[in-house]
Structure formats: C-alpha cells, structure tokens
Image (spheres, rainbow, N blue to C red):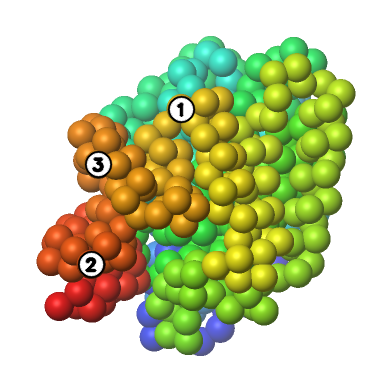
Amino acid sequence: MTPKHTQPTEDPRRTVETVYRLESPRIIAAVTRTVRDIGIAEELAQDALVAALEQWPRDGVPDNPAAWLMTTARHRAVDLIRRRETYARKLTEIGRSLETTVEPPEPPTPEDIDDDLLRLVFTACHPVLSAESRIALTLRLLGGLTTPEIARAFLVPEPTVAQRIVRAKRTLATKNVAFEVPYGPQREARLGSVLEVIYLIFNEGYAATAGDDLLRPALCEDALRLARVLQGLMPKEPEVHALTALLELQASRSAARTGPTGEPVLLKDQNRARWNRMLIARGFTALSRAEAAGATTSTSGPGPYTLQATIAACHAHAASYDTTDWPRIAALYAALAARSPSPVVELNRAVAVSMAEGPVQALRIIDSLTTEPTLRDYHLLPSVRADLLQRLGRKEEARADFLRAASLTQNERERNLLRTRAEECL
C-alpha cells in the first residue's frame, strides 16, 4: 500500500531531521530485533533517513512520518537478510513469513516498543563494554544524542566519545551479544549503568547542552517511560524507584522553567503554581517505595538516587524558594558527596550552602573547584561563582564570570540569560 503524503512543506529537510531525532531510538531497537546487530541496525535507520531526505522534499511529508521511517528501515533489514549468505539460517530465526512479506508488520504496540527499548539499553550496557562505553553507546542509540552532546554530558573530548561508540558496537558484534533483557545476577550487574544512562538521557532533555531550546521534552518523556517500565520489571530495587521519583519530581517543574518566548526561568523565580502536581504526587509515591525497598534490602544507607530524589522532594514540598529547607538540602548533598564523590555534586552542594549559610562559605567551596580538570569548560561553575559574587556586591568580578559562563555554554537560551545577568552587573 502506497503511503499518503501531504503537500511539500516549506522545509521538509527540517521535518525529516526532527522526526528522525525523535524516532531513531525506536527504529534502531525494532530493527535490532530483526538483524541482531546494533551497529547494522543504526546503519539501516540512517539509510531510512537518507531515503526520507531524498523523497520527502520531492513527494511531500507522509501523513505518518514516523511509521514511514520505521517501515523503510524494516524493508532494508529484510533486504539485507535476504542478501546474506546465511539467508537460510536467518530465515529460520526470524520466521519464514518474511519470504512472502510485501509490507513489514504494523508498528509494534507501546508495550513492544518499551520491551525493545529496554532490550536496547541492557544490550548496550553489557559487561563486555567499559562503563563509559556502555553509557555513550546507549545515549547515542536510545537518546538520539550526537557525539558532541554526549561529550558535553561526560565533560570529555568529542574524539574520545566517538572512539568509545565505534569500539562498543564492534565489540558487541564480535562477541555476539544477545539482544535481550537479562535475568538474575546478570541483570543486577548491569543495573547501575542502565540507571545512569536513563538519568543522563533525562538530563539532556531537561537542560539541552546545545541548540536553540532549553528543553527537549521528548528525551524527558523517553527517560520517564523507561524508568517507569524498569520499576515494573524490578519492583524490589530501591534505586529503580528512586530514579523514577527523581525524574518525576524534576519533570514536574518543566512548564515553569521557561518563559513566554522560551527563555530560561531560574528556580528562585519560577511560578510554583505551574509545577505539575500529578507528577509531584507520582514522585512522592515512587520515593516512598524506594525508602520502603531500601529499608529491607540496603545495609549501606540510602543510595545516590534516593538522596537526589529526597533533595528534589524538599524543593517540591516548599511553598517558595526562600522557605525551602536549605540546611537539610545541604546535608543531603554532603551525604551524596560522601556516597558518590563528584565535582558536580560539590558544585550543587555549594548552591545549597549559599542559601543555608551564606555566599561566603559557598564561595570557598566553589574556589576549591576552579582547578578541577573536569570542570574546566563546564559553564555552570563560573555561572554559580558569578551569582555568589553578585550577592556579595563584587559586581565587576561577577560580570566577568557571567560572560565566561556565556562563552562556554552551547545552548543559545542559556547564553542569552547569562549575558543578561552580566549586563545587570554594570
């Protein structure tokens, strides 16, 4: 059946790129189920992208562009299998119905999509890969992030990330890693990387590293859906519930984080009436489950996601920025720093300390981080420092740090905000 097309749009190329960005994780996951090779599945998905770039400007955008890309990628997967010398064996594996199939099957149900995405996450987080490679590969395949965006999330050079992705796909292929969700001890071994991947995907959606928009809601939605599915899959794992709680509570603020023209709105200036109460309630429920599960399974105290979710809950409980329980948040960040030491955690702790004890104490923490190599090009370090200096009346120094932060960020919305704050220091 020939797909319906709309009239050619003013910029079909932009439509192609947007749809592919949103749908590529599902396409790659579905095609991987057929070809059993993540690298090949990504190539086939990109082939479908090229076909769309050739055809949509000429024929118009299909009524269902996502289904068009999925169908095209699956057709190419079928053609590839038929061309292989091992056709007979592969035909047995995927079913003889392919031999006479003219159209690929209908797009999978939402449940099938979730299953495929989870298989993709757990496969990309296989222990044959290094932890860094697992996360980079899954962010590329599942999150649809580019190599520069992943490098920004990791605070490492782009060539390093590119090498990790290439080597990871090669390793999975040569080791014949199964496309599956593991069970028992194997699942436990991969869970930490899976949770980190989901968290990083959400963070990229919550505060985009580059581009014209502060938010990328589709990534937040993908991360939330995966976290919720993982909850059902592993109901006794406290950190699974805790991660879900953290994402629900963070996502609840999304509508208030941007103004009428998409400009960022700082936490202290947000209209809390716009916070999503349903997501907050879901977050509180998930956090309660995390605490209950942790009480029966953990002997080392709350895990890092439980601590972060508790911090987010403190913000959700507060009626305003000024009435937030900042001493408790500072203490929770101190506990998080002891459990999972990180310069970024220290940076966040400094913000809480500034509210609980004052900017002078916080500035000492910030200045101790200025020589940290991983934060050298991290725009939030000079941004936080500038805010503290501004509060201390050191406006000239604050302006310089705001301008430095603006030069480091690749997000246009953040850059504009930082430049505005720099001008306020004049």
Q: Which numbered dot is residue 341?
A: 1
Q: Which residue does the numbered mark 2 point to in the structure image?
A: 393
Mark 3 or 1: in front is 3
Q: Which residue type carries mark 2?
A: Gly
> Is label 2 in a helix, a strand or a loop?
loop
Comparing 77 with 41, the one in front is 41
Q: Which residue does the numbered mark 3 point to in the structure image?
A: 367
Q: Residues within 10 Å of mark 3 (few under 14, many from 20)?
A: few
Q: Position of residue 125 (x, y in %)?
A: 57, 26
Q: Which residue type carries mark 1?
A: Pro
Q: Quadrant of the N terminus?
A: bottom right
Query: Which residue is at 80% across, 57% downward?
Result: 282
Mark 2 or 1: in front is 2
Q: Quadrant of residue 405?
A: bottom left
> Counting residues from the N terminus, which is met first, the one under dot 3 or under dot 1?
1
**Mark-to-mark CA distance, 2 and 1:** 31 Å
**Mark-to-mark CA distance, 3 and 1:** 17 Å
Q: Is residue 271 above or below residue 287?
A: below
